[in-house]
Each structure stands twice: as C-alpha cells, then as structure tokens.
Amino acid sequence: MSEKPWGGRFESPTNEFVEAFNASIDVDARMYGEDIAGSRAHARMLCQQGILSSEDLDAILRGLDQVSAEIERGDLEFTIALEDVHMNIESRLTAIIGDAGKRLHTARSRNDQVATDTRLYLRTRTDTMIAYIRKLQGVLVTLAEEHAATIMPGFTHLQTAQPVTLGHHLLAYVEMFERDAGRFLDARKRMNQCPLGSAALAGTTFAIDRNMTAAELGFDAPTRNSLDGVSDRDFIIELLAAASVCAVHLSRLAEELILWMSAQFHFIDLPDAFCTGSSIMPQKKNPDMPELVRGKAGRIIGGLVAMLITVKGLPLAYNKDMQEDKTAIFDAFDNLQGSLRVFGDMLPGMRVNVEALHQAASSGFATATDLADALVRAGVPFRDAHEIVGKSVGYCIKADIELHQMDAAACQQIDPRLTAEMVGALSVEACVAARNHIGGTAPDQVMAQVALWKTALENNHA
Ligand code: ARG
C-alpha cells in the first residue's frame, strides 16, 4: 500500500492482475535516459526559481547519476508495482537520497513527464531513422552508378513496356526514401516543443520557468497550451504515418527483389548471408529478408491505424488510453529501423545478372514505342504509326522473331511507310540512350543524378 506514490487516498491494495495490466514499465523502461534528463532539467529550474534549495538540487543530481549508473549496469530491478519508468526512477531516487527525492515532483505531473520523455526519446530515434534512410540511399546510389547503363525491361502492369536502365530504376527508390526522410524531418520540427510545466493539465501554481527547461532539453520552445501539451499525441501519429509510408516503399522494393530472385526472372541473386534454405527442398534459397521487410509494413501500418483509433474521440486532457501510444510507435520504429538496416547491409552484396536483364529487355517487343516514334519522325501520324507497329508485332509473334529482325519485304507488306532502316535501327541501347532529358532513363541522365545524389548525401540532405 504505502509503496504506491499515489496511495494516500486508497484503503485497499490494487488487484493483483490490475497491477500487471495497468503497468507500462515493460514498454517505457527504455525511456529511462530521457526521464532522468527531464528530471535534471526540472530540478535545476526549480532551484533557479527558488522552489527547491541548492542542497536538495545537489542531492537530486547526485542521486539521479547513481540511478542512471545502476540502470546501465543492470543493477536496478524495475517493478510493475511502481507502474512505469517515472515512478520506478523517482522511487529509487528517494530510497537513495531521502526527502529531497520526494521534492522532485513539485510542479510536475507524470502527464507532462511522459509527454516530454516520449518526445525526447522519439526525437533521437527519428534522427537515427533518418540516418538509416540516408545510408540505404547511399547504397542505392552506389548501385545505380555501377548500373547506370545496365539495361532491363521496364514494366507497366508487370508486362514488358520499354527498356530502362537498372540505375534509373534504383534511383526511383532513392527519390521515395528522400521524401520519407523529409516526412520524418517535418514531423520532428513540429514535435520539438516542450510540454514540461503543463503539469497534470492546467499548469502549476509555482512560478516555473518553462523557457529554461525547454532550452535545456533542446526543444525549440515550450508548448503554448498546457491541455494540449499533455494530451497531444499527433506527433506520434505523424511519426507512424511517416514510418508507414516508408515501410510501404520498402515493401515495393522488397517485392521486386523477391520477383527478381525467382528462377523465372533470374535477374539477381541475394547474398547467402541474407537468405535461408528449406528443411525439405534442398534446392531452395529463399529471400527471407525481403519477404520479412514486405511483411513488416503490415504491422507498422497497423500501429498507425491503432493510434488514430485510440486518439479518435478522446476527451481532453490525459487519458490512460494514451499509454498505448508507446507500444505502437516503439514497435513501428524498431521494425522500420531493422528493415532499413537489413536492406542497407544486404544490397551491396546483391549480384546482378546483367545478361539476363539485357535478354529480358530484348524480348517482348520493348522497342515497339521507339519504332512508332521513328514512323512519326518520317511524317506518319502517331495513331497510324501505332497501328503499323501493332501489325508488325503481330507479324513477329507469328514468325517468332523480334522487330529488328524484320526484312524489307515484310516491312513493305505491312505498310509502305515502314522501312528496313527503321527496324534495323532498333536496339535497347538506342531506346534508353534516346530518353536523354531530365528524369529520363538514359545512362547520361542516371550519371547526372548519381552525381547530384552523392553531393546531397555527403552534405547529409538533398
Ligand atoms: N505510464 C503512463 C503513460 O504511459 C504515464 C502517465 C500516467 N499518468 C497518470 N495520470 N496515470 O501514459
């Protein structure tokens, strides 16, 4: 009974199952560093404002150092009886330093405490996430440079459409991840406001200095409204949204890697260290990492949906429902970071079957659009050109040849405007080289983009 910091008005102890069900220590223990940093800033501010004596402040700072060291050594055993990281730390502090520890919670509530800790923790995690995104972008840019002129089929509807360069294809993902990093940065800007001092919901009767704590904890400013400060969870929703979009991008890349590694495509091989075998089929080498990354998108998006629904309709200010926020965001961040890391480590070891890619681009009439463009250049209206090339493709399918293998007689028979020179000039190399404008697939363009990305990533932004 007496163990509970809030036990004063209670006559009977907490139900045993409720104690465990209510506790969040298993989830929030990882914020101990942020909780201690917040307490240090709060105590210094209380002392500066004459609310706490300098002897008490000294004791608190020393005590917090010890608690921190104990946690880091694994010597402090957290207990569900003390619910969460905030009360576990405060209780240990008080056990070490006595009454001064009991004064720390002056002008503070767990409501502003948890809101502050979570922002601090996620701020660091967001920076790390962005670093992992940058690393993966760097890996993709290196691969794109290597394969600036590697020709592969470009698909629409997963049907061969036009030849593209593998470098161009990979840089498409670099663009997606750039926007993902931007979404994290953007969310980080908005969340970097300090709720400390909002207290339970209405603020406090003490003459606190919120600018001081906000500055000491690296926030841009204190939050402007105490009710909002303790009850806002949209920073978590925004981070989950950013994580979800990034996970969706990773899942698209994952899906392509899985397809490309199949015997039917045979475009790539992933390093053994990132694949597993089958216990029954000896020939199997499974792309488990891309599959798992593709799967992670599901739970990350699940976290976003869970948080949106948890916050929907919640009255102001703090409600215990909000304790669920950390499960969702920590799980999403752990899994997204893991996904980014595993792709960043795996892709440099990817073997690209350049011949198979070229072969695939050379079949399936990927050059058909370029033949139509050649007819247009000779004065044929585009719709007629489309029709002529369509007939040519039909002819080639029957004759089991490619467009560039059509002879003069065949061309003349299909349409007098179609010439052997036109079909003879068709090649996948010419197709990609011709798309030489901003955003085009030409090797020159890929190299230009690679150069831009290298500079941007070296400066750690784009
Ligand atoms: N463990 C709680 C959470 O994560 C901390 C805040 C609890 N506040 C309260 N008034 N019960 O949300």
Image (cartoon, helix red, strand yellow):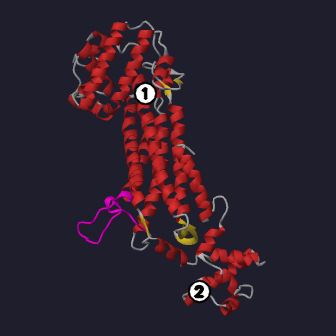
Foreground mark, 2 or 1, reads: 2
Q: CA distance from mark 2 to mark 1?
A: 67 Å
Q: How many numbered marks have been drawn onto this rendered protein structure? A: 2
**Within the image, what quadrant is residue 30 found in?**
top left
Quickly name the residue at label 2: 396
Q: Which residue corresponds to the image point at 49% horizontal and 17% vertical from the top-left?
A: 212
Is 6 displayed left or right of 343 in the figure?
A: left
Is 457 displayed left or right of 36 in the figure?
A: right
Magenta-tinted stretch: 268-290
Task: Using the rendered image of the protein, determine whether residue 29 is visible from the camera's viewpoint.
Answer: yes
- Local packing at callout 2 (Cα closer than 10 Å; few below 14, some 14-19, many 20+) is some
**Within the image, what quadrant is residue 328 found in?**
top left
Q: Which mark is residue 115?
A: 1
Q: Which residue type carries mark 2?
A: Cys
Under circle 2, the secondary element is: helix
Q: Earlier in the sequence, mark 2 or mark 1?
A: 1
